[in-house]
Image: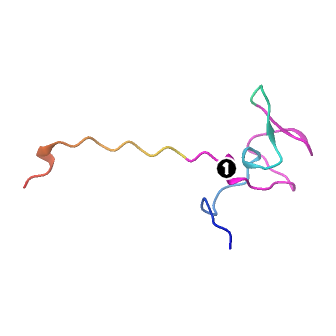
Amino acid sequence: MAMKLFNDDVAPSCAYCVVAEKREDGRLFCPKRGPVNEHGHCGWYEYDPLRRVPKQAPRLPEFSAEDFPV
């Protein structure tokens, strides 16, 4: 069984596809379909977990010693 790096609810996106290439101008190009939309996908879509950038963790609130009475 393969190790999963992320959960299964990742929506298909050309930005995460093995086939799509990011060009110098920032747009995606698929050798199968030509220029593609970042949020689209097609039958050639194959998920590459290393292309996905996880969301940043939220900042934790600042606490002081007064917040923790002994």
Q: Residue at x 65, y 48 (%)?
A: 52
**Coloring applied to the structure:** rainbow
Which span of residues is magenta-colored? 27-54
Residue sitting nearer the eye, 23 or 27: 23
Q: Residue at x 60, y 45 (%)?
A: 53
Residue 11 in which image quadrant = bottom right
x and y percentages locating residue 31 in the rendered image = 91, 42
- Above or below residue 37? Residue 47 is below
- Above or below residue 41? Residue 4 is below
Query: Is 7 left, or right, of 39 in this rendering?
Result: left
Tell me, yes or no, whether the highlighted magenta stretch contains residue 22: no
- Tell me the quadrant of the picture where the C terminus can be found: bottom left
Residue sitting nearer the eye, 14 or 39: 14
- Above or below residue 4? Residue 19 is above
Query: Is 2 left, or right, of 55 in this rendering?
Result: right
Q: Residue at x 79, y 39 (%)?
A: 37
Q: Residue at x 63, y 61 (%)?
A: 9
x and y percentages locating residue 47 in the rendered image = 74, 55
- Tell me the quadrant of the picture where the N terminus can be found: bottom right
Residue under pointer 1: 50
x and y percentages locating residue 25 in the rendered image = 77, 25
x and y percentages locating residue 23 in the rendered image = 80, 31
Tell me, yes or no, whether the highlighted magenta stretch contains residue 51: yes
* Residue type beneath disc 1: Leu
In the current view of this chain or complex, which residue is farthest to the left?
70
Please give the count of numbered marks on the rendered protein.
1
Q: Main secondary structure of the magenta part?
A: loop
